[in-house]
Structures are given as structure tokens and as C-alpha cells.
Image (spheres, helix red, strand yellow):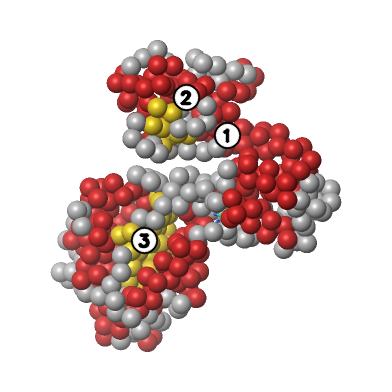
Amino acid sequence: MDEARNPYTPNAGSPPRFLAGRHEELEGFRILLQRLQSGYTEQSLIVTGLRGVGKTVLLGRYRQIALDMDWVAVDAEVSKATPFAPQIANLARRALLQISPAARWSARVKQAAGIVKSFSLTMQPDGAITAGLDVDAQAGIADSGELAHDLPDLFEAIGNAAHDSGRGVVFLFDEIQFLSKQELEALVGAIHRTVQRQLPITFAGAGLPQIPGLAGDAKSYAERLFRFPMIGELTAEEAVEAILQPAILEGVLYDYEAAQAIYAYTEGYPYFIQEFGKAVWSYASASPITLADVLAATPIVESVLDESFFRTRVQRSTVEELRYMRAMAQLGAEEQKAADVAMQLGKTSEQVAPLRARLINKGLLFTPRHGYAKFTVPQFDKFMRRHMTMDGISANTDDD
Ligand SMILES: Nc1ncnc2c1ncn2[C@@H]1O[C@H](COP(=O)(O)OP(=O)(O)OP(=O)(O)O)[C@@H](O)[C@H]1O
Ligand SMILES: [Mg+2]
């Protein structure tokens, strides 16, 4: 098929041509904004899910929904490399400048600008993030240097400015598992303040599934301030839509069995669907795409995933970790009892528990229920069996 018109998007954060499912999560966000707009309070949203399920894409949609409702939306990706306080100072500055143009600032908005400036200068004393804030810094507010004190002041100021201008503000943060405990605590405290004041300002985040626990540790009332919708693989029906719809937009159809076979391979995992769609589009020569096309494209998809996706996961693992996962793969793709994996390794559960915990922490395994673990992505068991010896060493030596 015409490669220039390949409609699939197997890239991190890349908005799919057709967003399948996620209706509840989208509706939940709309209701959140509507409620805040009308002066009700509502829990902020933190979307959690494993790698590649579509968290970044969903945050992108949230941004669009906010803009469509005439809210100010500012977004950032949290990373270990970028300090959070200056990052949020910059977002606050951008939010304020978008609430209303400086020439039309009311006394309230000017005051907020002074607070944003004081926060910015406290967190980044060289003044690098104060462009457009041509006001004096407000002394005594948001300038203690303690994020836990200053962030609530900052959010309250922005919330007041938004309220005064008849607007709303949403902060969107991706990868929030990278926030430190102190940063998360400050953020929870800031949201708490804006809820108490019933201000039209909120926060929506996305991150790996360990977030609810982290936030709960950070502040006991976090669970009441936030909802943590978890997203995962698409249902069979949604997955088929995710496969068919992008092609239909280009006038290309699939045979029923072809779409079903892609669903069977990908198990509804959004990133794999895009990768498979892309490969089968490249391979097929005419519409409708057939089961034979899908079968022929399968080894292509497999090698693309091996080279990029699976390989990078393996490269970040120690030999011990690889050996554990290889033993688990030997037992099959389904969830495995910790004790069975330990036995496969000739060890006790206690001996391998720290190893298992590390793999869960790295997002390679998850625990569907107590005492069990499963690979976080489909086909990983087969990759391990194809490429690893039981010793956790790459089976094809020319691979590395
Ligand atoms: N609802 C959906 N329907 C169809 N495709 C989707 C959907 N959600 C995400 N995708 C596709 O899945 C892939 C992964 O999406 P995204 O990068 O948002 O995942 P993520 O959860 O943020 O992953 P990571 O944790 O690695 O950042 C992208 O190629 C995207 O186009
Ligand atoms: Mg992402």
C-alpha cells in the first residue's frame, strides 16, 4: 500500500488517527472541568497504566478538551533530569499570560503575576523565567523556598486570576512517577488548597501504576483529592476499531479474519496495534487486507519489536533479572506463581523476592493478584524464549 499514506502511528505519544475506547476517561475529564467551572469541587485525575497503553495520548486529548472548553492548558513532562520547581514556575508564568493579555490585567491578575514572579525568583534566582511578568515580585507569598509552602500559594494565585477572568486553568503532567516524594507532597498540598478555595484550577497527570501508592504516602488525603483511573489494553471490539478505522479513512478495508488475527497477536495492546498496522499496511498490495497479509507481516512485526521494543527492555536488565524472566517465560505467557518461578530457578521464593520486586519496579512485570506476576507486555515470553538461554545470556551471539 502507498507508504506515504500509512495511517498508523507506532511512536511514543503520537496521537492515533483513531482513538479507540477511553470514553469513560474522556468523559470524566470533561465533567471535572465542567464542575470546577460551575464552582463545584471535584477530584483531580491521575491516569495510570503500563508503558505503551496510551497515557500520553490521553493527556493530549485532555489538553484538546480543555482548549475546546476555553480553558488554559499548560503541560510538561516530568523527568529526573529537569528540576521540577523551575519547570512549574515556567508553566505558571505561561498559564498566567494565557489567562488574559498583560494589557488587560485586573488588580487581581496583577497581584497573581507578582506572586508568580516571587515564586519564579525563589526557585530560579537568576530571573530566567520571569519574561512577560513586568510587575514587582510580591514579598512574603510563595517565596519561602519550601516547595510545600510555596506551591499552594502559587496555585491559589493562579486560581484567583483565572476566576477573576472567567477562565479555568489545567496543569497537565506526564511521567509523574518521576516526581520526588517532596514534590508530590507539595503538588497534593497545592491541589488541596485550590479545592478548599473552590477555584477553577486543576491538575491532570499520567504515570506508571505505582503512583497511587506514592501519592498516598505523600499525603493521607491524596486518595480523596485524586482519582486514579487505570488504562490498559483495549477490548476486542476497541482493538478492532483501532485497526480498521485508520485504514478506512484512507479507503482501505480489512477482512474480518485479518483484523481478528492482529487482535490475537497484539492482545489489544495499543502500541503493538500501531506497529502491526504499520507493517501490514506496508506489506499488503491491495484492499482488503487479508489474513494471508497479516500472517506474512507477522515476522516483520516480530523483528521490529525485537530490535526496538524488547531489546531495549532487556538491555536495561541485569543477568540475574534476565534469568528470572527467562525462567518465567519457560512457564508460559500467563500469570505465574512466585513460588513456581523460584522453583524453576532452583531457589526459594524468599531468595528471589528482591529480584522480583526490582522487575516490578522497572515495569517489566506486574502483579495481577497477590503472589502472582505477569509480563507487562504481550509476546515478551516468546521473545525471551527466542533470544535467551536459561542462563540469561543472549542465545544468538551475533545479536549484541
Ligand atoms: N486509544 C488508542 N487507540 C489507538 N491507538 C492508541 C490509543 N492509545 C494509544 N495508542 C497508540 O499507542 C502507542 C502508545 O501510546 P502512548 O505513547 O500514549 O503510551 P504511554 O502509555 O504514554 O506509554 P509510555 O508509558 O511508554 O510513555 C502510540 O503509538 C499511540 O499512537
Ligand atoms: Mg507516555
Question: Badge 2 is on which residue?
Answer: 328
Q: Are marks 2 and 1 in contact (CB under 8 Å)?
A: no
Residue found at x 77% / y 57%: 252
Decide which of tag 1 and tag 3 comes sooner along the chain. 3
What residue is shown at x 31% (from left), y 50% (from top)?
212
Whether residue 1 is visible: yes
Disc 2 from disc 1: Cα separation = 13 Å
Tell whether label 3 touches label 1 (CB within 8 Å): no
- Residue at 75 percent of width and 52 percent of height: 254
Where does label 3 land, which residue? 45
Q: Are marks 2 and 3 in contact (CB under 8 Å)?
A: no
Give residue 32's position: percent from left, percent from top: 37, 70
| Amino acid type shown at disc 2 | Met
- The quarter in which the C terminus is drawn is top right
Viewer-closest of 351 and 197 = 351
Nearest the viewer among 283 and 334 is 334
Foreground residue among 131 and 340: 340
In this view, the residue farthest toward the top is 346
Is residue 362 at least partly visible in the picture? no
